[in-house]
Image: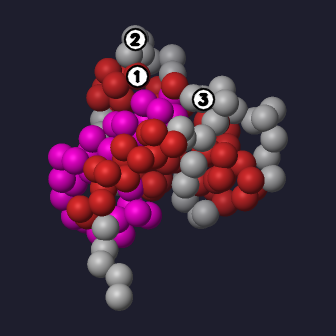
């Protein structure tokens, strides 16, 4: 789910930052960023900092929300078992999404190009439907 879709679902305007939208969406769905972070995440905060070219820890809280949102997006698309190992391409999709959420934090949402790229990475892991 994109930040824009989260905004629409929750009826939130531009006065809310992307991080706030992601956090409110997590609360709305019954999850919390800290609960998602408590699970085994395929991406560490250090990897997210490198992906986003962030130095220091000032933006760690936002990055953790972006990680949680990206993991949720990948799990929603793939129906990946929380206990399952993360293939490299799914980890790459999470990093791509984290970078996109960080880069577009002021405008919200995923660009079509980023969404297509992430979908191409997760497609082999999507469940077969009848």
Compared with 129, 125 (above or below) is above
Local crowd at mark 3 within 10 Å, few (<14), some, or many (≥20)? some
Tell me, for residue 55, which label it has, or none: 2
Q: Which residue is mark 1?
A: 52
Q: Is residue 72 visible?
A: yes
Q: Earlier in the sequence, mark 3 or mark 2?
A: 2
Check disc 2: other Cα within 10 Å, few if <14, some if 14-19, many if 20+.
few
Q: Residue furthest top?
A: 55
Classify mark 3: helix, strand or loop. loop
Q: At numbered mark 2, what does the secondary structure look like: helix, strand or loop?
A: loop
Horizontal relation, residue 109 to residue 118: left or right: right
Q: Is residue 85 magenta?
A: yes
* Image marks 1 and 3: residues in contact by CB distance under 8 Å: no
Q: Position of residue 25 (x, y in %)?
A: 64, 53
Segment colored magenta:
74-102
Q: Is residue 13 magenta?
A: no
Q: In whole angstroms, how far apart are the C-alphas of marks 1 and 2?
A: 9 Å
Residue labelled with disc 3? 105
Residue 45 place in picture, x, y as percent: 35, 31
Residue placed furthest toward the bottom: 130
**Foreground label between 3 and 2:** 3
- Tell me the residue at 23%/62% (across/down): 124
Question: Does residue 91 lie above or below 1 as drawn?
Answer: above
Residue depicted at 18% across the width and 53% down the height: 87
Name the residue at 37% across, 37% down: 96
Mark 1: which secondary structure?
Answer: helix
Mark 3 vs mark 2, CA separation in Å? 17 Å
For the C terminus, give its image quadrant: bottom left
Q: Pointers 3 and 2 in contact (CB under 8 A)?
A: no
């Amino acid at each position: 789910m994109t930040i824009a879709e989260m905004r629409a679902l929750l009826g939130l305007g531009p006065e809310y930052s992307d991080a706030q939208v992601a956090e409110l969406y997590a609360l709305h769905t019954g999850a919390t960023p800290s609960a998602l972070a408590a699970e085994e995440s395929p991406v560490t905060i250090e990897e997210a900092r490198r992906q986003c070219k962030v130095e220091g820890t000032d933006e760690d809280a936002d990055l953790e929300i972006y990680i949680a949102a990206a993991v949720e997006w990948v799990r929603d698309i793939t129906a990946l078992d929380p206990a399952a190992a993360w293939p490299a391409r799914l980890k790459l999709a999470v990093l791509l999404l984290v970078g996109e959420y960080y880069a577009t934090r002021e405008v919200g949402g995923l660009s079509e190009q980023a969404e297509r790229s992430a979908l191409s990475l997760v497609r082999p892991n999507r469940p077969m439907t009848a």
